[in-house]
């Protein structure tokens, strides 16, 4: 897999201010600051104590929560977490220089890199379940399948998995994107629109789907067998250019991976309590949700690979066919194996290993 030379951030300060003020839902610190110089210890490894990573989290701060539950949140570097409604907003923040590390599905990087000026690379992939990725109709609706969406107003989360699986479900039903009145909405706004009757159906994920079902919504289509289950980790070019920040990024991804393993290893009920509290659902439902997800596809981090690149290329080609991209996009241009050696070592270690940059 080719390595790519980093390009510096190109976003204007005004864009950064907009991202910070309007996109961050919950911020635990300021903007990105990885430390531009890599101090080294006497052993020649980077000094991670000088590193501060600005990292994105989604929804109910699940990465922070699982790290804390597993006792793996005491990192030798500082982490400034910011919570977003989706990976698309994380990539916007990264483009504006506000994040060093982001987590998303395969879709947001496609749009963030569409102009050919991406200031980030995909550095790792977490395999995870594709449940709670659904098209739902509100309580009392007569709509029971995707084919009935023709001519209807359908809310969706733009540039995310929701848009992708909605597009694919429409194709399977013999419909085109233009056969529906597609309404781009953020998850919370989409849920409100569904409940208030301003859309006839909603394509969304995660908490929005959980809440929709709690309010009586029914599933009319699912992305479970459409989505790959690949969820990307992105790092800014600035982060990848700094050995200490690079090592810290690998360590953080490995810690999160080990935290999920900790939950699977007899701590499911403890995690379910955190999930239930954060998502306002019954404990037994939160537990079954986690167990069902892990049964479908255990959460597991992996280094970048040709197969993962090919999977995202398929997604990019679909959006090109949809007319959502200005041209065909070669996704390999924003992937790298620069973190593979450090991440493989950290994943293989019995405990998190920090400061092992090559």
Image (spheres, rainbow, N blue to C red):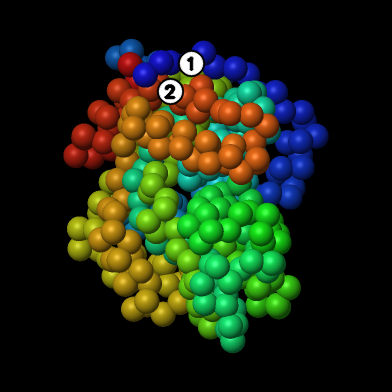
Q: In this view, does 34 lie above or below 60?
A: above
- Left or right of residue 78: residue 31: right
* 59 relative to 310 in the view: left or right: right
Report whether residue 211 is seen: no
Estimate how packed mark 1 is, as few (under 14), some (14 to 19) or many (20 or more) residues with alpha carbons within 10 Å.
some
| Residue at point 73%, 50% (across, down) | 22
Residue 32 point in image, percent of width and height = 60, 33
Q: Residue furthest front?
A: 174
Report the side of 306 relative to 159 (left or right): left
Density class for disc 2 (Cα within 10 Å; few <14, some 14-19, many ≥20) is many
Q: Is mark 2 on a helix, strand or loop?
A: loop
Asked whether the beta carbons under mark 2 and mark 1 sit within 8 Å of each other, the answer is yes
Between 106 and 36, the one lying in front of the other is 106
The residue lying at 45 percent from left, 63 percent from top is 222
> What residue is disc 2 on?
336
Name the residue that disc number 1 marks. Answer: 4
- Residue visible at 43% across and 15% down in the picture: 3
Task: Indicate which disc, 2 or 1, sits on the residue closer to the N terminus.
Answer: 1
**Residue 64 in view in this figure:** yes
Quarter of the picture containing the C terminus is top left
Q: In which quarter of the image is the N terminus?
A: top left
Residue 343 or 327: which is nearer the viewer? Answer: 327
């Amino acid at each position: 897999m080719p390595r790519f030379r980093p390009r510096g951030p190109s976003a204007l300060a005004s864009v950064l201010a907009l991202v910070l003020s309007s996109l961050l839902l919950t911020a635990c610190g300021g903007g990105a600051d990885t430390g531009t110089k890599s101090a080294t210890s006497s052993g020649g490894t980077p000094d991670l104590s000088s590193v501060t990573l600005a990292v994105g989290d989604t929804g109910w701060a699940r990465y922070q929560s699982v790290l804390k539950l597993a006792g793996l949140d005491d990192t030798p570097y500082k982490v400034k977490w910011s919570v977003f409604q989706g990976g698309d907003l994380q990539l916007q923040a990264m483009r504006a220089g506000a994040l060093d590390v982001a987590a998303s599905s395969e879709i947001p990087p496609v749009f963030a890199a569409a102009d050919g000026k991406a200031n980030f690379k995909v550095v790792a992939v977490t395999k995870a379940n594709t449940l709670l990725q659904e098209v739902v109709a509100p309580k009392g609706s007569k709509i029971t399948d995707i084919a009935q969406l023709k001519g209807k107003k359908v809310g969706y989360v733009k540039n995310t998995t929701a848009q992708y699986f909605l597009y694919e479900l429409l194709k399977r039903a013999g419909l085109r994107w233009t056969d529906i009145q597609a309404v781009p909405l953020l998850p919370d706004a989409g849920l409100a629109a569904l409940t208030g009757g301003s859309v006839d159906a909603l394509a969304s994920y995660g908490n929005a789907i959980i809440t929709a079902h709690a309010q009586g919504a029914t599933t009319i289509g699912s992305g479970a067998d459409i989505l790959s289950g690949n969820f990307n980790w992105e790092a800014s070019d600035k982060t990848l250019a700094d050995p200490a920040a690079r090592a810290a990024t690998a360590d953080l991804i490995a810690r999160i991976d080990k935290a999920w393993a900790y939950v699977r290893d007899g701590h499911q009920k403890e995690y379910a309590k955190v999930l239930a509290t954060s998502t306002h659902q019954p404990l037994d439902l939160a537990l079954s949700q986690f167990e069902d997800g892990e049964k479908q596809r255990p959460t597991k981090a992996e280094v970048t690979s040709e197969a993962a690149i090919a999977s995202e290329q398929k997604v990019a080609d679909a959006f090109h066919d949809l007319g959502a991209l200005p041209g065909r996009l070669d996704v390999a241009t924003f992937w790298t194996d620069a973190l593979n050696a450090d991440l493989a070592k950290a994943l293989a270690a019995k405990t998190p290993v920090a400061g092992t940059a090559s």
